[in-house]
Amino acid sequence: MKLLQLELPPAYHHVGLLILRLAFGFSMIYGHGAGKIGRLFGSEEISFADPFGLGPVTSLVLVVFAEVVCSLLVMAGLFTRAAVIPLIITMATAYFTAHFDDEFGRQEKVILFGFAFLCLFFTGPGRFSIDAMLQKKKR
C-alpha cells in the first residue's frame, strides 16, 4: 500500500538542493559566523576554544573561515563539496568539544548543521549552482 506517492519533475530535486544550500549557508553566517567576525576584529583580547592546540586566534580564524567564507561558497554552489568539508569538521568539533554533554536541545543545531552539510557533500550542489555552470562549460 502506497501511502503517499508524489511524482515531481526532476528539477524539483535541484530546487530542494538550492533551498538547502541557501537556508543552511545563510543561517550559519547570520547565526554563527557574523558574531565571530566581530570577535576577530574587535578590540578585546581573543578568548576562544582551542581544541587542536593551535592557539585561540588561529582556532577562531579557522572557524570564521568555515562559517563565513565556506558558507558563502555553499550558498553560491561554488566548490561546494570542498567548501562543506571545513563546515563538517567545525560542526563535529563543536559537537564533541562544546556540546557533547549538553541536553539534546542545545546539541540539536550543531547536529542539524553537520548533517545538512554532510548531505550536500554526498549530493553536490545541484543544477542551480556555479559548479553546475562550470561543468557545462567543460563539456
Image (cartoon, rainbow, N blue to C red):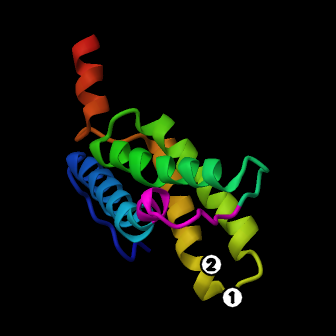
- Front position in the image: 99 or 9: 99
Identify the residue shown where x is 57% and y is 78%: 108
Q: The residue under label 2 is which amino acid type?
A: Gln
Residue 97 lies, with reference to residue 74, above or below; the image says below
> Which residue extends farthest front?
43
- Front position in the image: 78 or 18: 78
Residue 24: quadrant of the picture: bottom left
Q: Which residues are magenta?
A: 36-49
Q: Position of residue 56 (x, y in %)?
A: 67, 56
**Residue on which the image places disc 1:** 103
Q: Quadrant of the C terminus?
A: top left
Res. 107 mark = 2
Res. 20 mark = none
Q: Is residue 26 magenta?
A: no
* Secondary structure under the numbered disc 2 in the rendered image: helix
Q: Position of residue 35 (x, y in %)?
A: 42, 68
Q: Is residue 44 magenta?
A: yes
- Front position in the image: 108 or 3: 108
